[in-house]
Amino acid sequence: MYYRDNQKISGFTLIELVVVIIILGILAVIAAPKFIGLSKEAREKTLMQLQASVKTANTLAYSKTQMPSLQSQVVAGRDDIIDIDLDGDGTVDTRLKWGYLDNTDVGKWITSDEKLVTQYQGIDITYIGYDLNNNILVNDDQCYFRYTQATDANTPPQYDLNLQGC
């Protein structure tokens, strides 16, 4: 410290303050994209896990339909849809189309992030994803998982991811 007239001068010089501000600015420019990238990666990983969960749930449901002990109810007038009791308590737990989850039941069997939005398109397709532009639609943000239910007994459901807009 410098002394002037027997008084101690303390504090930062203007040059020291400018240098600190420049260093903080450089660190912010370097760190900000990393943190932005983390949220993008988190959304992508959430959707990938969602896709895996739906595939697993569908595999289990389809396997259950192949067991003779299955308690099911055929929907009147429809040979493609059955209502099943998965836990044996006498109440219908889910609806299957061609032995796979109906697209309207997909959300029922997954635990998901509260920020995920479900959007139905027609009677066969369900989108689950992020509504990044807050317009209640998911498919226009290109950050979603799309489930297309089975179309017939020989065509299993489709599981598609679109991560371009995440």
Image (cartoon, helix red, strand yellow):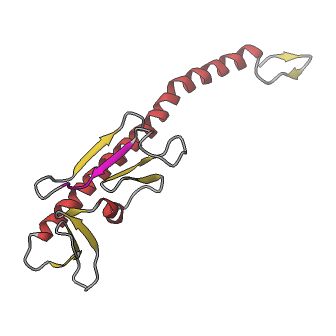
For image coordinates 12% across by 59% down, the residue present is: 153
Q: Nearer the viewer, residue 79 or 125?
A: 79
Q: Which residues are magenta?
A: 144-151
- Asked whether, in this view, residue 158 is left or right of residue 30, the answer is left
- Quick check: 89 above or below 35? below
Q: Main secondary structure of the magenta part?
A: strand
Q: Is residue 163 above or below residue 13?
A: below
Q: Residue furthest front?
A: 77
Q: Quadrant of the N terminus?
A: top right
Q: Is residue 18 above or below residue 72?
A: above
Q: Residue at x 28, y 71 (%)?
A: 94
Residue 26 in the image: state x and y as whole percent: 57, 20
**Quarter assignment of residue 11:** top right
Q: Residue at x 28, y 78 (%)?
A: 92
- Within the image, what quadrant is residue 81 found in? bottom left
Question: Was residue 150 drawn as part of the magenta stretch in this picture?
Answer: yes
Asked if residue 79 lies in the magenta stretch, the reply is no
**In-front residue for pair 107/8:** 107
**Residue 140, relative to residue 8: is it above or below?**
below
**Which percent across, then down, holds residue 144?**
37, 44
Specify the farthest residue to the bottom. Answer: 90
Residue 39 location in percent, x, y? 45, 40
